[in-house]
Image: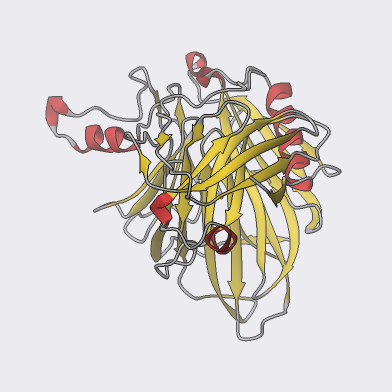
């Protein structure tokens, strides 16, 4: 498996012009895991940064890697869309159990253009939401798209550049000018068929040993869009299961360099605290092999992308927080991982895909190894400590 240690392709680093009087504070970040964590995302609470750097403007903060002296690209995120920042994120590579040092600075920065490694957009008149990073692309469907449900579609990429807007534009052209994204023109294609399934890692209620899906999303909002993270939320219309009414909201985020989306799903009802089982699933294609590792909290499918062997293999997977995992279930059309939660609470899990023609994975062993690593990263999150200059 080829996971690069330094893959900030297309990023333009910045130089900060800070004066001696500008506040600065040291920061140490430790990877407690016994495995390396390349392209790890470090998240800092804005309230902490704001207090320590004497109330900076969001665009007036920089992060310096002490080992190289270079400024690192960062992103400020307003997680609840209230007009006030909530966190700052940046990325770095970590060896097993490595501690790295950074410097947070306040001051006027001279910045060149940032090149985003993620993108997301809601597309009219189709009313679907598509998103991507430098590895993979996905989409979900809104009310205008018939014959689908709440599944996640996969767009396989074999370039590091962003393609979603370009592919939509090509598909929308008429006549000879049309460039369909269902054929690979050198960048990848949409080979995946979602239909009424969960596709690549969506979820639904699990009741009476059956999957219950809410249909297409009704509302959406974009929370963050680059340069490091794309994050958005989709909400579904009220639906009834077993005589009880539910409202579902999914918050999906995808960071640069990752093949997995982080999915935070919440079910609300008239009575918060009611026990629920949630099924996150991946749809079975012809010729796939199912794998699962309940000890590490993941399931996967690996096999032909489609009927044309030139398109090689596609892997899909779901990684569940082990504290929520109940059991794994193989069905005729899906592999499921069942989690336990309650109404009003947020369940977090991860799902995504990898294509062999993209170049990072060549076998099911590569893909399953990646899911194992992701499980360990989730179980051993980075430890952040503020210190002196």
Residue 331 visible:
no
State left or right for residue 352 relative to residue 9: right
Nearer to the camera, 352 or 41: 41
- x 47%, y 38%: residue: 73
Residue 339 visible:
yes
Nearer to the camera, 65 or 328: 65
Which color scheme does this rendered protein use?
secondary structure
Q: Quadrant of residue 208?
A: bottom right
- x 60%, y 67%: residue: 266
* Residue 4, x across and y down, in percent: 60, 21
- x 67%, y 62%: residue: 347
Nearer to the camera, 233 or 94: 94
Query: Looking at the image, which residue sits at the far right?
Result: 295
Nearer to the camera, 258 or 56: 56
Q: Quadrant of residue 345?
A: bottom right
* Residue 237, x across and y down, in percent: 45, 72
Q: Is residue 132 above or below residue 23?
A: above
State left or right for residue 162 relative to residue 76: left
* Residue 53, x across and y down, in percent: 53, 57
Q: Quadrant of residue 273?
A: bottom right
Where the C terminus falls, by quadrant? top right
* Residue 326, x across and y down, in percent: 81, 57
Query: Looking at the image, which residue sits at the far front?
Result: 20
- x 52%, y 15%: residue: 309
Where the N terminus falls, by quadrant? top right
């Amino acid at each position: 498996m080829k996971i690069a240690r330094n893959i900030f392709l297309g990023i333009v680093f910045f130089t900060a012009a800070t004066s001696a009087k500008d506040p600065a504070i040291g920061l140490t970040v430790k990877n407690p895991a016994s495995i390396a964590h390349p392209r790890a995302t470090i998240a800092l609470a804005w309230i902490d940064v704001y207090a320590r750097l004497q109330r900076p403007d969001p665009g007036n903060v920089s992060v310096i890697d002490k080992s190289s002296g270079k400024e690192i690209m960062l992103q400020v995120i307003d997680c609840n869309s209230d007009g006030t920042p909530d966190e700052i994120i940046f990325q770095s590579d970590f060896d097993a159990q490595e501690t790295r040092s950074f410097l947070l600075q306040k001051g006027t920065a001279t910045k060149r253009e940032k090149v985003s490694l993620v993108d997301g957009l809601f597309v009219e008149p189709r009313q679907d939401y598509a998103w991507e990073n430098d590895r993979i692309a996905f989409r979900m469907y809104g009310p205008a798209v018939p014959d689908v449900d709440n599944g996640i579609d996969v767009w396989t990429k074999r370039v590091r550049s962003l393609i979603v807007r370009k592919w939509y534009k090509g598909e929308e052209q008429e006549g000879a000018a049309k460039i369909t994204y269902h054929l690979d023109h050198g960048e990848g294609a949409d080979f995946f068929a979602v239909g009424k399934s969960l596709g690549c890692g969506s979820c639904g209620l699990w009741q009476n040993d059956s999957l219950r899906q809410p249909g297409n999303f009704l509302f959406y909002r974009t929370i963050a869009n680059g340069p490091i993270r794309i994050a958005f939320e989709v909400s579904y219309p009220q639906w009834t299961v077993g005589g009880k009414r539910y409202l579902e909201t999914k918050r999906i985020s995808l960071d640069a360099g990752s093949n997995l989306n982080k999915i935070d799903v919440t079910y609300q009802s008239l009575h918060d605290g009611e026990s629920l089982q949630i099924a996150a699933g991946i749809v079975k294609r012809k010729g796939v092999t199912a794998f699962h590792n309940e000890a590490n909290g993941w399931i996967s499918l690996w096999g032909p992308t489609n009927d044309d062997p030139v398109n090689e293999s596609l892997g899909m997977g779901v990684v569940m927080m082990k504290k929520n995992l109940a059991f794994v279930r193989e069905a005729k059309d899906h592999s499921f991982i069942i989690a336990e939660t309650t109404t009003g609470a947020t369940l977090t899990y991860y799902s995504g895909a990898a294509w062999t023609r993209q170049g990072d994975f060549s076998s099911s062993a590569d893909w399953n190894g990646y899911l194992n690593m992701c499980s360990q990263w989730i179980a051993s999150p980075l430890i952040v400590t503020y210190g002196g200059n």
